[in-house]
Structure formats: structure tokens, C-alpha cells
Amino acid sequence: MAVRELKPGVYAVGSIDWHRRLFDELIPLPHGTSYNSYLIKGSEKTVLVDTVDPAREVELLTNLQKAEVKKIDYIIANHAEQDHSGTIPKILELHPDALIVTNQKCREMLKDLLCINDEKFLTVTDRSTISLGDRTLEFILAPWVHWPETMFTYSREDKILFSGDFLGSHFASSSLFANNEAKVYEGAKRYYAEIMMPFRKIINRHLEIIKGLDVDMIAPTHGPVYEDPEAILNMCRDWVSDNVKNKAVIIYVSMHGSTEKMVNHLIDALIERGIAVKPFNLTGTDLGELAISLIDPATIVIASPTVLVGAHPEAAYAVSLVNALRPKLKFAAIIGSYGWAGKMVEQITGMLSSLKLEMLEPLLVKGHPKETDFQAIDRLADEILTKHKNAGLC
Ligand code: FEO
């Protein structure tokens, strides 16, 4: 692991986790990740901004040795989650006079999560500052990216915003800076979709606050550092906006092919009507890909056979995820095949309670779809097109 300089006196000292493939035992990491920790050597005080996952503690300690750090005065905790806070106890052990600088909410969480004593903290409030001698660090409370205690740290003289998870990307790279832009931005989009999409209204407010800062570098806790903040900020503005697009996501599972035939017919019907379609067969879906695809479509179609009395469990699992992520969808339809009876429509509709959706007429087919069923699917495609047109999307 290497120590890399962002600006004079500011160093990346964290860890690249090339081979991690799952986060929170839920989120796929196809490109690994990094836990970014930053060292600022002020003229009077030395600061560590966030730490690393405890499994990568040795790398952080090795980097601090390489950077010839004798004393750490402050450990800034922008976020309490353990992939950034988990090595704080070890740093405190090695630098017993260091203070953890964070907000009140994060302080309480760190006490709970890491069993740190109360006297080890220096509590900051929104827009309060600390001096490092030649530098001033300003703290900006930014809750819900993606926990309630999150904050940003802004180095005024360096014009660096240490943004915690915000604008981060699960992307392991040897480049300190985001020069492989397409991949980094895709990683950042995936990260936003997976954990921050439910908080997009709040994130919009944070973006407005950042607009008022003179920032020429954004240093998140995952993935490369942005030297061109405006590009990633503009992308994020689009993700969090209320705008939806002329797109439909279809999530489906099929046991004996009947539901799949309905889905395939619907895909063609939507394409023929000029609507972009993204289908996901849930038996082999990367949930991160699904999350990305939920950022801006106007419509979701949920297609499932009936199992016992309800939706196929794969469909129910995906719907629970959609409901939790709270994408800005406008319309939803439920289609599928059944054998004798069931309550799939009521079940799935009930599971989408967090979304403000207009539910279109469901379409359930007994057994294999017949010609009249395919005609009904065409009418559903017509209805989706009409809804999109009326919403000004096409
Ligand atoms: Fe990267 Fe929310 O921790």
C-alpha cells in the first residue's frame, strides 16, 4: 500500500480492498472497493480524516509509519459506520492524546458501536471549525448519506471537501484520482443507487450547500478522488432530481415459461412504442445493476407466477428491495401467470407502500398465455405509452 499526496501536506493513507465482493452481506462489489483515510499535516496539528475497515488496519498503520507520523492530534469521524470508524480504537491506542472530532449524533453512535469513552471526543456543530495552524477545517452536518450522523469536512485552504460516503464509488483502483472516469462514475452511480437513493430529497439539499463552497477536490471514503468536482456533482444532481425518463424496468421470474412469454411479448411491445426497456430475470440478477436501473425509469413492471397463494419469493424479495430504495417511479404494473388462485396482486401492491405509484390494471393469466392475453399485454404497453406521453416523457 502506498501513501499518495492529494495536495501539499494532504495524503491518502487508506486501503484498497481489491478482492472484496460483498458489502453488508448484501451489496455486490464487482470492482472491489477502498476505505479512504486522509492525513493532513497542519503546521500545528496533525489530523486523520476517517480510518479504515478494521480488517485493513495494518495497511493504515503501515501508511502512517511511511508518512512519518509521530503524533495524531485529531481523528475526524465523518461517519460512524465501521468501514471508516472501525480502526479508531487502534489509532487511539497508539495516539492516546488524540481526540475524536465529530458531531453529537456520531459521537453517541461511536460510543455504542466501538465502546469508546466519552472523554475522547471533541464535539462539533454545523459550520464550526478547528484550526490546524495553517489550515482551517470546517464541519458541515450532512445527515442521511446514508446514516443519520453523517457530516462533511471542508479544508478551506486546500479547497478539499472530505465527503465521507457521499459521491464515493465501490471501485478499487491504483489511481488516486478519478481518471478512469466512465468506470468511476458507474461505480459512484451504483453506490448512490444502492444506499443513498432513499434519501435523494435530503441529498439535494446537501448539493445546494456544496454549491456555496469553493471546492476544487472531493475526497470521498470509497473510490478515487475527484479533481473535477463539477462533473460528479452534475451527475448526482440528475440522479436526485424529480425527473424520470421514458423507460420501463421489468423485474420477473418464471417457473415454467408462461410468465416469461408474457414478459418477452411486453418487452417487444414497449420497444415498438419507443419506450426504453430494461428486463431483469431475478434468478440471476446483480442487485446493484437493478438498483442502478431504478434511478430514473418512469415505470416498473413486476412479473411473477403465483406460488402457493402469493408472488414467487424471488419477486417478493426484489419488490421489498424496490420499496426500500424508494426510486422516483411513477407507474407500476403487475403481471403473471397462475394455476388456480392467489393474492399476488394484493401482496405486491401492499409491499410497495413506500412509493407514490399509480398502479396500472394488473394482468394475470391462467396457465399459458393465449392470443387474447397477448392482446391484453399490447393494451398494457399502450397504457404505459399513454402515461409516459401525458407525463411529457415522449
Ligand atoms: Fe462506507 Fe456507510 O460506510
Image (cartoon, rainbow, N blue to C red):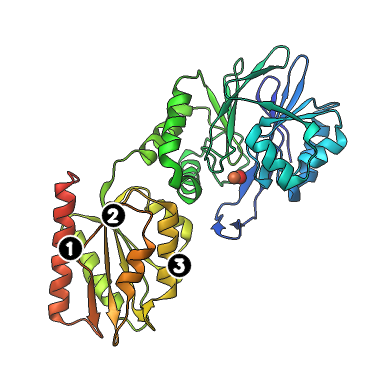
Q: Nearer the viewer, mark 1 or mark 3?
A: 3
Q: Is residue 154 left or right of residue 390?
A: right
Q: For mark 3, give the secondary structure.
A: helix
Q: Which residue is mark 2?
A: 357
Q: Measuring from the top left, give residue 99's x and y in whole percent.
A: 78, 29
Q: Quadrant of residue 153?
A: top right
Closer to the chain start, of discs 2 and 3, is: 3
Q: Measuring from the top left, give residue 290's x and y in whole percent.
A: 42, 58
Which label sits on residue 317? 3
As drawn, 205 above or below 136:
below
Q: Nearer the viewer, mark 2 or mark 3?
A: 2
Q: Amino acid at mark 1?
A: Ala
Q: For mark 2, give the secondary structure.
A: loop
Which label sits on residue 2? none
Structural distance between the alpha carbons of marks 1 and 2: 17 Å
As drawn, 5 above or below 311:
above
> Can you say which quadrant of the picture contains the N terminus?
top right
Which label sits on residue 381? 1
For the residue with label 2, is its CB less than 8 Å from the closest atom of ligand 1? no
As drawn, 349 above or below 147:
below
Q: Amino acid at mark 3?
A: Tyr
Closer to the chain start, of discs 1 and 2, is: 2
Q: Residue at 28% across / 75% down in the picture?
A: 336
Relative depth, front residue between 230 and 76: 76
Structural distance between the alpha carbons of marks 2 and 3: 19 Å
Q: Is residue 394 visible?
A: no
